[in-house]
């Protein structure tokens, strides 16, 4: 226990602290922007980011992952805020947390096993594109100074690590923010700063119970939004955890992460914040800046609050161009460039799933819809592929009076039609033996296909014998097959 705690909290103090500083600075404009998207005051997003980051540092199952207010969640809140106001959003945030805790205890994180690698890759690429697109308003209709500052920021981010000694010890995104802020202050150029994004809070968050009626009507209003928020939040968090697992080559407890996200959202709702989840962009910034443990997430959350409450005058002077450069670096680092190179090597079905996930996610700006479509496509391709692995051959026996059919492969809804069409019902033989020792029947559709084959042979006056059913197939066939039930056979074949 002590060793685990030390490893998660204090094994990388310098790296975690510096990375947390970078993440805290990157969180400020994003939290403000997401608040504006949701239609609430900027401090709602800032309080949420502080609260969620601090709580998840202790309760989350993925050390080094950053959670805060996110754009994917903010998009789902727009209608609720517009029609019912902030108080109902806070109530929905509390219910979201409860649903996520329940999901953790039900071990719903295990469903991630059904998300294929091509879907994860598509999710990552779509998120990288969305992160980049989110920066375009800051680069549209601006003076040349903004472009110059952004390019200078990117140059610092990518070239600073090559400097001897200091290049590896200080995160280049932090250097970018400090240097460009100094240039802005010394030059006095007219460009947008963090202060132009919205008013920063000047007080600490306080306990706030949502001022809504505790009635069933309130529950029915917030329940649909809470369900969507819980699903999208867990989906993005599980995806991000998987990506950070890969980046750090370490495992994580996904079910604990579900519970942790729920506790963090409850805390956020009670302190006047909106619902949030894991952020892939900031998590990548954290890892790329050297953050590995829970301390980086805690530092990011605590420093965020200190910056916006006590140092808001200084924070408001950070040019947006510096933060745009950092986020462009994140989008470039997040995008799986290998997936483009591998398009020629990967199967067509894999490429279609990946590209469809990207297209749907970017087109709808909804990560849940994109992933759902990707998973659905992957399942269809898989079912089709397995359904094609079915061979049915035959041979004559007993001087032409008996035919033996050998079935090899998987029989289920995708292959049942192929199974039924492989038999010759017009052949004149006394007996047909169907050898199923190398076949497996998976579902009711497969059993119904077997029923039709047996019934059709018997209708032609041919005796049918089934041999070799394995135990699992025999169980489902015995339970659901009707070919030995005369009444059921009559009904199936259209009798009265």
Image: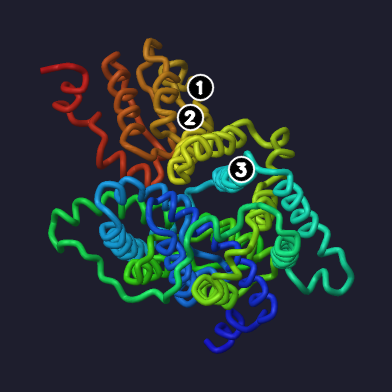
Question: Foreground: 441 or 208?
Answer: 208
Q: Position of residue 250 (x, y in %)?
A: 62, 68
Residue at x 43%, y 25% (from the top left corner) = 419
Dividing the image into 4 quarters, which one contains the C terminus?
Answer: top left
Say which of marks 1 and 2 sits in front: 2
Question: Foreground: 355 or 172?
Answer: 172
Q: Is 104 situated above or below 128?
A: below
Does dot 2 land on a helix, a strand or a loop?
Answer: strand
What is the CA distance from the residue labelled 3 to the residue labelled 2?
Answer: 62 Å
Does dot 3 land on a helix, a strand or a loop?
Answer: helix
Which numbered tag is attached to residue 406?
2
Q: In this view, does 137 lie to the left or right of 201?
A: right
Q: Where is residue 40 in the image (x, y as percent from the top left)?
A: 38, 55
Label 1, residues with CA under 10 Å away: few <14, some 14-19, many ≥20: few
Which badge, 3 or 2, comes first in the chain's sequence?
3
Q: Position of residue 442 (x, y in %)?
A: 38, 40
Q: Are marks 1 and 2 in contact (CB under 8 Å)?
A: yes
What is the CA distance from the residue labelled 3 to the residue labelled 1?
Answer: 68 Å
Q: Where is residue 416 in the image (x, y as percent from the top left)?
A: 40, 28
Residue at x 55%, y 46% (from the top left corner) = 123
What is the CA distance from the residue labelled 1 to the residue labelled 2?
Answer: 8 Å
Say which of marks 3 and 1 sits in front: 3
Does dot 1 land on a helix, a strand or a loop?
Answer: strand
Q: In this view, does 258 lie to the left or right of 92?
A: right
Residue tagged 1:
395
Tell me the quarter of the picture where residue 495 sits.
top left
Residue tagged 3:
136
Which numbered tag is attached to residue 28?
none
Q: Is 110 situated above or below 470?
A: below
Residue at x 21%, y 65% (from the top left corner) = 211
Which badge, 1 or 2, comes first in the chain's sequence?
1
């Amino acid at each position: 226990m002590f060793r685990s705690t030390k490893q998660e909290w204090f094994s990388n103090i310098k790296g975690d602290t510096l990375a947390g500083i970078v993440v805290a600075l990157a969180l400020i404009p994003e939290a403000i922007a997401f608040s504006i998207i949701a239609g609430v005051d900027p401090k709602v997003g800032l309080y949420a980011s502080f609260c969620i980051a601090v709580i998840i540092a202790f309760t989350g199952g993925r050390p080094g992952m950053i959670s805060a207010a996110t754009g994917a969640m903010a998009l789902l809140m727009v209608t609720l805020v517009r029609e019912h106001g902030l108080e109902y959003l806070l109530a929905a945030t509390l219910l979201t947390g409860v649903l996520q805790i329940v999901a953790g205890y039900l071990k719903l994180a295990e469903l991630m096993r059904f998300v294929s690698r091509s879907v994860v890759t598509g999710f990552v690429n779509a998120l990288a594109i969305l992160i980049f697109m989110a920066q375009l308003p800051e680069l549209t209709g601006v003076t040349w100074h903004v472009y110059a500052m952004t390019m200078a920021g990117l140059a610092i981010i990518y070239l600073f690590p090559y400097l001897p000694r200091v290049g590896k010890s200080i995160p280049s995104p932090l250097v970018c923010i400090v240097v460009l802020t100094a240039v802005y202050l010394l030059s006095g150029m007219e460009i947008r700063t963090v202060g132009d994004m919205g008013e920063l809070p000047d007080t600490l968050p306080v306990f706030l119970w949502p001022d809504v009626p505790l009635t069933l009507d309130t529950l029915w209003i917030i329940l649909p939004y809470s369900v969507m928020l819980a699903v999208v939040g867990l989906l993005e968090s599980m995806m991000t955890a998987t990506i950070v697992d890969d980046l750090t080559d370490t495992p994580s407890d996904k079910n604990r992460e579900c519970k942790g996200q729920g506790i963090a959202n409850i805390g956020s709702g009670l302190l006047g914040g909106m619902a949030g989840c894991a952020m892939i962009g900031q998590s990548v910034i954290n890892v790329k800046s050297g953050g590995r443990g829970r301390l980086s997430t805690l530092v990011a959350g605590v420093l965020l609050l200190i910056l916006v409450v006590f140092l808001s005058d200084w924070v408001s002077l950070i040019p947006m161009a510096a933060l745009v450069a950092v986020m462009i670096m994140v989008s470039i680092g997040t995008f799986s460039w290998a997936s483009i190179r591998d398009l020629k090597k990967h199967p067509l079905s894999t490429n279609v799933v990946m590209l469809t996930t990207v297209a749907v996610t970017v087109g709808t700006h909804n990560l849940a819809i994109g992933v759902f479509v990707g998973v659905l496509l992957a399942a269809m391709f898989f079912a089709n592929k397995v359904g094609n692995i079915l061979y049915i051959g035959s041979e004559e026996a007993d001087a032409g009076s008996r035919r033996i059919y050998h079935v090899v492969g998987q029989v289920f809804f995708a292959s049942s039609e192929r199974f039924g069409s492989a038999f010759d019902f017009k052949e004149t033989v006394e007996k047909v033996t169907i050898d199923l020792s190398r076949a497996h029947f998976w579902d009711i559709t497969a059993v119904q296909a077997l029923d039709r084959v047996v019934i059709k042979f018997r209708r032609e006056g041919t005796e049918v014998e089934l041999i070799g059913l394995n135990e699992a197939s025999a169980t489902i066939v015995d339970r659901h097959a009707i070919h030995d039930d005369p009444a059921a056979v009559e009904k199936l074949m259209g009798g009265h």
